[in-house]
Image (cartoon, rainbow, N blue to C red):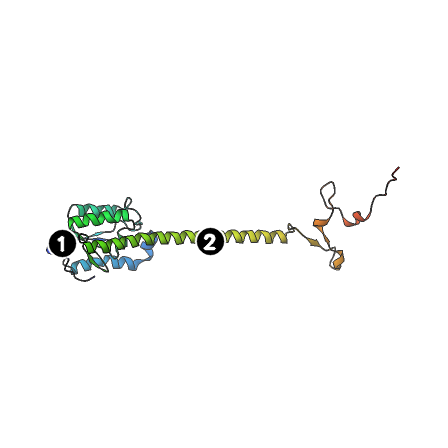
Amino acid sequence: MSRSELVSLHHLQRKALIYIRQSTPHQVLSNQESLRLQYALQQRAMELGWRAEDIEIIDADLGLTATSASHRTGFREMVAKVTLGQVGIILSVDVMRLSRNCSDWYPLLDVCGYRGCLIADRDGIYDPGSANGRLLLGLKGQLSELELHTIRARMTAGLLGHRAARRISLTASCRSGARCCGFGPQRSRSRGPGSSGSDLYDVSAAPISRSGGAVPQDARSRRAPSRPLW
């Protein structure tokens, strides 16, 4: 951002709000550089002409997603101050920090345009009351919402792919374990370490006795004497 002719004495007589937000508590703890850049916007507001006592920081939404405004007290407080005509400019590192839902974004643009409040990010300063400013801010809001849906779709696809791969792995492990434990369709067993290949027999092909067990091979070789037909 640089000094802009959009900033007038009318704006400087009101407050400058700095909106700070991180999407998750993990980002608040791990991404300290982003927090430092957001809090540094106070210096930028002073460079634009606001006094230090007229600069207010709203960071009540740290660790909250911007998918909706219903759970964000900081966002609602900001909208209320703009509606009362107390704010001359809203500063954020990126307008995506303000909202990722067009249902919340466009009402904010409407009230800012009606009250003459500017919106600024690292790319520039915009006037929501002008056609060009509303066009650019509207595109940024739509891209922000689209990006959120894209991220969700990729995470869902990755989760489904991980579950499918896990099912395939478990199925392969069960089949392999069944073969090793002798529960497969075919199993060969040797009578001893010195037996030849002719001594091998297939349990699955062995006859079954009335008790349910396999009949030994030597028992099968002994047949009952045949009865006369008369």
Say which of 38 and 197 sits in front: 197
Residue at left offset 19%, top offset 47%: 111
Image label count: 2
Counting residues from the N terminus, which is met first, the one under dot 2 or under dot 1? Answer: 1
Question: Furthest-left residue in view?
Answer: 9
- 209 shown above or below 195: above
**Looking at the rendering, in which quadrant would you find the N terminus?**
bottom left
Which residue carries the number 1 mark? 11
Amino acid type, mark 1: His
Q: Whole-percent x and y of residue 140?
A: 27, 55
Residue at left offset 19%, top offset 60%: 44
Say which of 52 and 72 sits in front: 72
Residue at left offset 29%, top offset 60%: 33
Amino acid type, mark 2: His
Question: Furthest-top residue in view?
Answer: 230
* Dots 2, 1 in contact, CB < 8 A: no
Q: Note whether residue 22 is visible.
A: no
Q: Whole-percent x and y of residue 145?
A: 31, 52
Q: Note whether residue 216 is visible.
A: yes
Which residue carries the number 2 mark? 162
Q: How far apart are marks 2 and 1 (CA)?
A: 53 Å
Q: Residues within 10 Å of mark 2 (few under 14, many from 20)?
A: few
Instruction: Name the disc covering residue 145, or none.
Output: none
Secondary structure beneath disc 1? helix
Say which of 106 and 26 sits in front: 106
In the picture, measured across the screen, residue 136 lies left or right of residue 212, that is left
Q: Whole-percent x and y of residue 183?
A: 64, 49
In the picture, measured across the screen, residue 166 lies left or right of residue 43, that is right
Residue 49 image-quadrant placement: bottom left
Secondary structure beneath disc 2? helix
**Looking at the rendering, in which quadrant would you find the C terminus?**
top right
